[in-house]
């Protein structure tokens, strides 16, 4: 490029950039070296399609190296030099840096990931780059307190994501872990949706909210890890990707949601079973999406039952246990499901013992599904009672012993009904047939 053409281009860039600078645009990135406490051994294979230099396939991605956030850089006059030679800064401003980015290590098999010589301009002058080889790729991210999902641009709603630490599960091992947290919201959040993502070796998970910290936030532990035997199960996820969305209409046009207090205590319960021949390294992700701040929402809460009197004898077949619990007057249910363990062969929820067909039934303890109801046909227990019943056959690896109610998915059993209802002033937990105060 000739000096005259270069000066003309610089002048044009300066004129175009004046408006951007006047608008105080954050068009730069400030990058931090990072120590990642979660995805410490991250690996992936990616394909790149870069319009300016071409495609590169089969590149090996490794753990995060930099975390970059939008910033505005102001050069101090007279401080820019190349060695001892003063450099005149160019009055240049680029487009806004719209999001933070994580930069991951990246290696591509040559000639992939290479590029020809490049000449570029920034505020500091003209750069002529040679021998370009890919070393990182930077991807857009969202913070813990803003998780926008796939909505249209500008429609980001409040929410957050919780990612559990990675943990090794040995071949053939069945175990549950609990990851304890405080939610990052600083104001009450009306939740409209939960989502979950987990690998195949995590069979199911639950989000349990508690009145106090059962363990310090950030703790991942397999001890005293309850599936929610004291209630407070606000979400149960099954399979690799799952979601639960609250009704957009309570019958009067008002959306329905759970009200999450600021800094709420809780934990994620994860049931893992590694049925491969290798050690697997696993973690789970839970997304929490809220209605816009200030939206009017009809409060909903979970209704959870727990049978604490299970006693399934050795070699028992089709042994059933049931209780019935009082339901709040006027309660409208929009979801009913269940939780049990591997001896379970059938679970059902009914209005009363005498009424059929069942309101909810499932033969699959790992993915029981949900019965959903929407306006104007929300479900009401006309008898005022919810009957929950679980049937078990003890013919597997616990067949030589009596199985009781407990926290271990490997050696104990549970019989739980999981529901959501409105209007509400708080969650309901029923132990056997007694509503907890």
Image (spheres, helix red, strand yellow):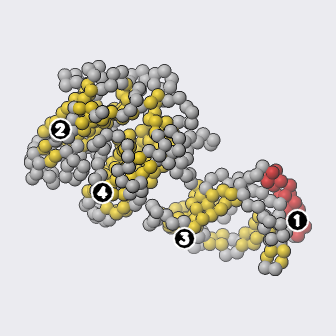
Tell me the distance, in whole angstroms, between the alpha carbons under discs 2 and 3.
Answer: 54 Å
Give how far apart the Cα atoms at labels 4 and 2 are.
Answer: 27 Å
Mark 1 vs mark 3: which is more N-terminal?
1
Cβ atoms under marks 4 and 1 closer than 8 Å = no
The C terminus sits in image quarter: top left
Q: Is residue 308 above or below residue 376?
A: below
Q: Toward which corner of the image does residue 32 lie, by quadrant?
A: bottom right
Question: Where does residue 358 sit, x and y in percent of width and height?
Answer: 25, 27
Tell me, yes or no, whether the two marked residues, 2 and 3, touch with CB atoms within 8 Å: no
Residue 86 location, quadrant? bottom right
| In this view, 269 is above or below 106 | above
Dot 2 falls on a residue whose secondary structure is: strand
Residue 394 place in picture, x, y as percent: 13, 47
| CB under 8 Å between discs 1 and 3 | no
What residue is rendered at 76% in x and 52% in y?
24
Circle 3 sits on which residue?
A: 107
Q: Earlier in the sequence, mark 2 or mark 3?
A: 3
How many discs appear? 4
Residue at 52%, 51% (x, y): give it. Answer: 144
Q: Which residue is mark 2?
A: 391
| Marks 4 and 3, how far apart at CA | 37 Å
Secondary structure of residue under mark 3: strand
| Alpha-carbon span between mark 4 and mark 1 | 66 Å
Q: Which mark is residue 222?
A: 4
Q: Where does residue 121 sit, x and y in percent of width and height? A: 77, 65
């Amino acid at each position: 490029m000739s000096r005259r053409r270069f000066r003309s281009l610089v002048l044009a860039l300066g004129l175009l950039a004046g408006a951007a600078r006047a608008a105080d645009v954050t068009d730069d990135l400030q990058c931090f070296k990072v120590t990642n406490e979660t995805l410490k051994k991250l690996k992936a294979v990616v394909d790149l399609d870069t319009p300016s230099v071409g495609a590169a396939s089969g590149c090996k991605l490794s753990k995060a190296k930099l975390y970059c956030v939008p910033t505005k850089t102001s050069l101090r006059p007279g401080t820019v030099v190349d060695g001892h030679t003063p450099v005149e800064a160019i009055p240049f401003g680029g487009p806004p840096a719209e999001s933070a980015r994580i930069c991951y290590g990246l290696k591509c098999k040559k000639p992939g990931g290479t590029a020809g010589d490049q000449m570029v301009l920034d505020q500091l002058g003209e750069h002529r780059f040679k021998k370009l080889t890919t070393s990182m790729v930077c991807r857009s991210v969202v913070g813990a307190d803003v998780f926008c999902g796939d909505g249209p641009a500008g429609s980001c709603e409040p929410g957050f994501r919780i990612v559990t630490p990675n943990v090794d599960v040995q071949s053939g091992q069945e175990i549950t872990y609990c990851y304890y947290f405080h939610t990052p919201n600083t104001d009450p959040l009306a939740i409209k949706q939960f989502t979950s993502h987990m690998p195949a070796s995590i069979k199911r998970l639950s989000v349990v909210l508690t009145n106090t910290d059962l363990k310090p936030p950030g703790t991942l532990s397999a001890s005293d890890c309850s599936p929610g035997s004291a209630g407070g199960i606000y979400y149960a996820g099954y399979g690799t990707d799952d979601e639960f969305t609250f009704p957009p209409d309570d019958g009067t046009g008002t959306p329905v949601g759970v009200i999450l207090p600021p800094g709420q205590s809780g934990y994620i319960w994860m049931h893992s079973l590694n049925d491969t021949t290798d050690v697997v390294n696993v973690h789970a992700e839970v997304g929490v999406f809220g209605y816009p701040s200030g939206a009017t929402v009809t409060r909903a809460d979970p209704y959870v039952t727990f049978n604490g009197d299970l006693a399934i004898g050795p070699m028992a077949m089709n042994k059933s246990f049931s209780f019935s619990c009082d339901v709040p007057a006027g309660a409208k249910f929009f979801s009913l499901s269940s939780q049990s363990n591997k001896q379970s062969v059938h679970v059902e929820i009914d209005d009363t013992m005498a009424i059929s067909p069942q309101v909810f039934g499932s033969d699959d303890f790992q993915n029981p599904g949900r019965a959903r109801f929407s306006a104007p046909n929300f479900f009401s227990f006309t008898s005022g009672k919810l009957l929950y019943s679980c049937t078990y056959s003890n013919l597997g690896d616990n067949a030589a012993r009596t199985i009781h109610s407990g926290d271990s998915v490997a050696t104990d059993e549970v019989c739980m009904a999981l529901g959501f209802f409105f209007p509400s002033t708080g969650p309901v937990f029923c132990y056997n047939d007694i509503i907890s105060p």
